[in-house]
Amino acid sequence: MNNDLKAHLLNDYQRDFPLESRPFAVIAGRLGVEESEVLHVLNDLQQQGAISRVGAVFRPRSIGFSTLAALAVAEDSLEEVAQMVSSYTEVNHNYQREHHYNLWFVAATSTETELQRVLKEIEQRSGCKVLVLPLVEDYHIDLGFDMTGSKTKSAAFIESHCGVPSQPYLPSEQENNLIAAIQSGLPLIERPFSAVGDALGLSEAEVVSGIENLIRLGVIKRIGVIVRHHELGYRANAMVVWDIPDEEVKQQGSCLGQLEFVTLCYRRPRRLPDWRYNLFCMIHGHDREEVMARVEEMRNGCGLQDAASEVLFSTRRFKQCGARYAREAL
C-alpha cells in the first residue's frame, strides 16, 4: 500500500469530502495519483478495519434522539449483556470500561418514543438500571482524529461549543430516505452519489444538493473518512469525568476542549446519588501511561487540581459503527 497516500487519506480527508460527481477523482488529482489508486487504498483500509466508512457524521441530537447510557453489570454476566445490548441496531457504540458502571453504550433513534423503548427493553432484559446521560451542551465534539501527532490542533479540529437544539430538525420524507441511504457510508466507487441516487430514484445532482442542505442545516457535522483510532495505534482511550460547579462548567469545558489531545468534551446531567459528574472528555493515547500524563496536563492546564474526577479506561469494544437515525425504505 502507498504509505504516503494512506497518510494523506487518513488525516487530510476526514472532512470536506468533495461533493462532486467523481469525488475520488478530485482527491486523486489533488494528491497526484490515479482515481483507482485512491479507491483501492480506501477499500483496503476499510477491509483492514482502519476506517469504518467514508461518509457523513451527524451532529448529535440535530436529528433524531440519542443518549449515552451505562449499566453496572455483574462480571459473570457482562459478555451476555454486552452482546444483547449490541444486538440493537439503535446502539452504535458499546464499550466495557473500568468502573462500577462497566458497560457504556450510545443509542440513537428517530423519535424520543423509540429511544425510551430501547432503553426500557435493555433495562428489563439486563436486570440492571440504565444510567441515562443525554448531551446537554458540547464544547468540542469532533470525531475526527488528528493522525499527524501535531501538538497544536489545526483550525479544522477546533470548534466552539454548541448548545443542543430544543427540538431536532424534522427531515422531509426525501431527506429521511437520503439520510438512511448514506448513514452507513458511501459506496467506494467512481460515482457514489449517482449510485445513491439510483437507489432512491433521485438524480446525482439531487443527492449532492440534499447533502449540501443537511450540512447547511447543521445536521451533517462533517463528511469524509471515518477512522478507527484503535486500529491505527491509539490503543488506550479513556473517558475522563469531572464534578464541576454548574456555574463553571462552560468555562472549564471550553478550556479542556482546546487541548490538542481532547477529542470530545461535553456536559451531561448529574444523576444523584448514583452519578455526580457533569463534564466528560475523551482522550486517546498509545498506552495508559500516555493517557494518564494527559490527564495531569488537563488538571494543570485548566486549573482542575482540586476537582473530583475519575478516569474510565475502555477495556473492550463490543460495537462501534455510525449512528442510524433513519430506517431504510423497504
Image: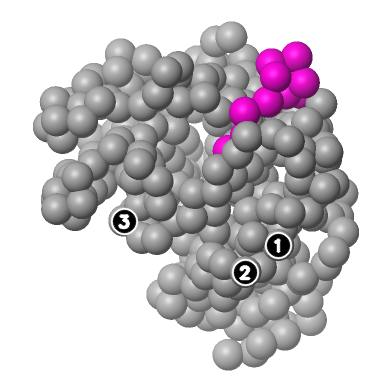
Distance in Å between CA atoms under marks 2 and 1: 6 Å
| In the image, residue 277 above or below residue 263 | above
Q: Quadrant of the N terminus?
A: bottom right
**Residue 108 seen in render:** no
Q: Circle 1 sits in a helix, a strand or a loop, which is it? A: helix
Q: Which-is-in-front pick, marks 1 and 3?
A: 1
Residue indicated by mark 1: 293
Residue at image coords 58%, 71%: 287
Residue bearing the label numbered 2: 289
Rendered position, 140 above or below 231: above
Quadrant hosting residue 207: top right
Position of 175 relative to 56 (above/below): above
Label 2–label 1 contact, CB within 8 A: yes
User: Which of these two is toward me, 290 or 264?
Assistant: 290
What is the secondary structure assignment of the residue under circle 3? strand
Disc tally is 3
Residue 180 vertical position relative to residue 78 in the rendered view, above or below: above
Label located before the other in sequence (3 or 2) = 2
- For label 1, the crowd category at 10 Å Cα-Cα, with few meaning under 14, some 14 to 19 and many 20 or more, is few
**The furthest residue to the bottom:** 1
Pointer 1 or 3: first along the chain: 1
| Magenta highlight range | 241-250
The alpha-carbon separation of the residues under discs 1 and 3 comes to 27 Å
Q: Quadrant of the C terminus?
A: top left
Q: Amino acid at mark 3?
A: Phe
Image point 35% across, 41% down: which residue?
100
Q: Position of residue 62 (x, y in %)?
A: 57, 24
Question: Of all residues shown, which one is farthest toward the top?
Answer: 166
Q: Which residue is mark 3?
A: 318
- Label 1 amino acid? Ala
